[in-house]
Image (cartoon, rainbow, N blue to C red):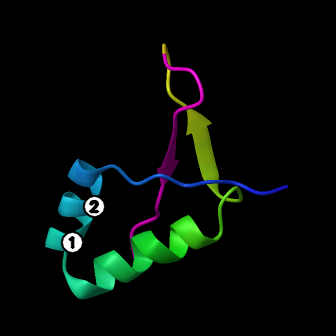
């Protein structure tokens, strides 16, 4: 099954402001989707959030 991941402009801007190690963790977590701590957002259809663990 294929997935399309859309990162909104506001989210990309937030990610790009993070330190390098943090950006790497976020982008690595995105790459392993749909595995991980992924849950649907309440009151939104087809929009999900993913928790990335702290080191």
Magenta segment's dominant SS is: loop
Horizontally, residue 15 falls left or right of residue 50, namely left
Tell me where residue 4 sits by quadrant.
bottom right
Q: Position of residue 39 (x, y in %)?
A: 59, 37
Residue found at the far top of this picture: 43
Q: Is residue 49 above or below residue 45?
A: below
Q: Is residue 34 magenta?
A: no
| Of residues 8 and 38, the one drawn nearer to the viewer in this rendering | 8
Identify the image quadrant of the C terminus. Answer: bottom left
Residue with the mark numbered 2: 12
C-alpha separation, residue under disc 1 versus residue under disc 2: 6 Å
Horizontally, residue 35 falls left or right of residue 51, namely right
Q: Residue, x 50% and y 19% (percent of image)? A: 42
Residue found at the far left of this picture: 17
Q: Is residue 13 above or below residue 18?
A: above
Q: Secondary structure at mark 2?
A: helix
Other-residue count near label 1 (Cα within 10 Å), few / some / many at <14 / 14–19 / ≥20? few
Kindly check if marks 1 and 2 are in contact, taking CB atoms under 8 A apart as contact. yes
The disc at residue 16 is 1
| Of residues 37 and 31, the one drawn nearer to the viewer in this rendering | 31
Magenta residues (range): 44-55
Residue found at the far bottom of this picture: 20
Identify the image quadrant of the N terminus. Answer: bottom right
Q: Secondary structure at mark 1?
A: helix
Q: Position of residue 36 (x, y in %)?
A: 65, 58
Q: Position of residue 41 (x, y in %)?
A: 50, 27
Q: Residue, x 41% and y 70% (percent of image)? A: 26
Q: Position of residue 16 (x, y in %)?
A: 21, 71
Q: Residue, x 48% and y 13% (percent of image)? A: 43
Q: Residue, x 61% and y 51% (percent of image)? A: 37
Residue found at the far right of this picture: 1
């Amino acid at each position: 099954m294929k997935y399309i991941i859309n990162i909104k402009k506001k989210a990309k801007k937030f990610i790009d402001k993070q330190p390098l190690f943090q950006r790497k963790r976020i982008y690595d977590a995105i790459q392993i989707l749909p595995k991980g701590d992924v849950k649907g957002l309440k009151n939104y259809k087809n929009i999900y959030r993913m928790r990335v663990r702290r080191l």
